[in-house]
Image: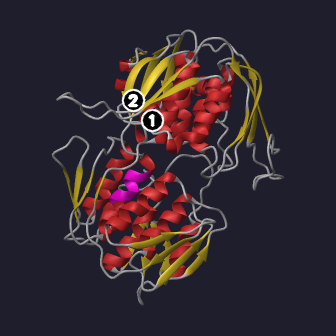
Amino acid sequence: MTAFRVAMNFVHPSLDTATPNALEVALTDDVLVVHGGTPLEGRIRVRGAKNLVSKAMVAALLGDTPSRLFDVPRIRDVEVVRGLLGLHGVKVSDGDEEGELVFDPTNVESASTDQINVHAGSSRIPILFCGPLLHRLGHAFIPDLGGCHIGPRPIDFHLQALREFGATVEKTPEGLHLSAPNGLHGTKFSLPYPSVGATEQVLLTAVMAEGVTELRNAAVEPEIIDLICVLQKMGAIIKVHTDRVIEIQGVKKLHGYTHRPIPDRIEAASWAAAALATRGHVEVLGAQQADMMTFLNIFRSVGGEYEVTDLRPPRGGSAGQEGGIRFWHPGGELNAVALETDVHPGFMTDWQQPLVVALTQARGLSIVHETVYEQRLGYTEALNTMGANIQVYRDCLGGTPCRFGRRNFKHSAVIAGPSKLHAADLVIPDLRAGFSHLIAALAAEGTSRVYGVDLINRGYEDFEAKLADLGAHVERP
């Protein structure tokens, strides 16, 4: 154990190896052996967006008839929400089509605190159960929340919004107990920051609250718009105005929905970055240009190439062909770029970590200014141990000052390249950083061991099978 702690501190000095999570990694076989240096070549497919599917599953609680959701990925977050729905009496079953789930909310019921606490720390999705459970049962219990450690991501916005609707919140050691003794009522609410989670909370609560709700400074990510489409199919009345204003007119009753979600633009961009970093060629079926325009512009600026392959309908009795986007490294040198993450339509924060691995291979100085999560650059320490040259700073570099400026957060990075990456033993700290570490191991010379790799299953369906389809040389020890 001591040897493992020393090794992990050397490779990932930001990791506190005295914590239970690090010790759990040390005691398990949760490791992937990666033989790097081989370009990724081939075709994979992405399913429905992780950041929409789980929210659409929660929305099924609001209906009085069954809902059907297609293209659901087999990821851990889906299993967590499925378990929580089952605890509350929602019957969840597999449909006829691969990736189809059917939700029957006819017999929604209370779940015991002990049952719900089984899922404590496994996901941040439970906070979104508040509004639907208050509408259906008049009360809700929310356990301790989990998720990736990329910043505090406080739930203050959520709780403040729920109180505005008329909910009472009691904090206890085991979690949050909520009730609505006088029902939920529409309100006017302005978010201090266009938080995706808080916007989802307001939408899921306002659709059946009495009266009209006006939400200002709302998030307008494609997954938010798709959630609005789900709720509108259920009978909700929602207007999306300009300047991040959403107006919701409460209704007394909602029914089930049938919906096929937008594809996962985060996973698509992750595989694109992997193709670029390994000098490979990957076609991502299901990827859509419209939701990835900002990423595609940066990808091309760096020197990557892509081709949009639109859906081809059936002709002459032959089957149609699914569209997507082909990404590849055209050869030669990559270009350094300056970018900053932002809420939609800016460069998505979940895109920067995979792309930074590719930027280590670009000639010159690249600058990344992270403005969404204050602690999202810790993963760069592991890249440096592999030969990358990345410096992180507290200053707002390469763009306008953000809310983290003049505070003690290292939220800007300067990447000097190109750097020759070599193999190392790595410990995955969070979902997106984990995939970045995996990309680095694939691009590096030699054999790496990536610990905690099962965390990637939270957001990437069958990623090991997809790696095999792309010709990667990986194995479980």
Q: Which of disc 2 and disc 1 is earlier in sequence?
A: 1
Q: Is residue 402 above or below residue 131?
A: above
Question: Residue 409 bears which disc, if any?
Answer: none
Q: In the image, what residue occupies the spot 40% across and 47% down?
A: 262
Q: Quadrant of the C terminus?
A: top left
Instruction: Answer few, some or many: residues within 10 Å of disc 1's Cα (few below 14, many 20 plus, some between 14 and 19).
Output: many
Tell which of 232 and 366 is nearer to you.
Answer: 232
Tell which of 160 and 255 is nearer to you.
Answer: 255
Q: In the image, what residue occupies the spot 23% across and 72% down?
A: 64
Residue 112 in picture, x, y percent from top left: 30, 68
Q: Main secondary structure of the magenta part?
A: helix
Q: Which residue is mark 2?
A: 463
Q: In the image, what residue occupies the spot 36% across and 35% down?
A: 311
Q: Amino acid at mark 1?
A: Ile
Asked whether the beta carbons under mark 1 and mark 2 sit within 8 Å of each other, the answer is yes
| Disc 1 versus disc 2: nearer the observer | 2
Tell which of 157 and 252 is nearer to you.
Answer: 252
Marker count (numbered): 2
Q: Is residue 420 above or below residue 322?
A: above
Residue 6 in picture, x, y percent from top left: 62, 25
Q: Amino acid at mark 2?
A: Phe
Can residue 440 be seen? Answer: no
Q: Which residues are drawn in magenta?
A: 52-57
Q: In the image, what residue occupies the spot 51% across and 43% down?
A: 290
Is disc 2 placed on a helix, strand or loop? helix
- Structural distance between the alpha carbons of marks 1 and 2: 8 Å
Can residue 328 be seen? Answer: yes
Residue 396 in picture, x, y percent from top left: 81, 45
Q: Which residue is mark 1?
A: 456
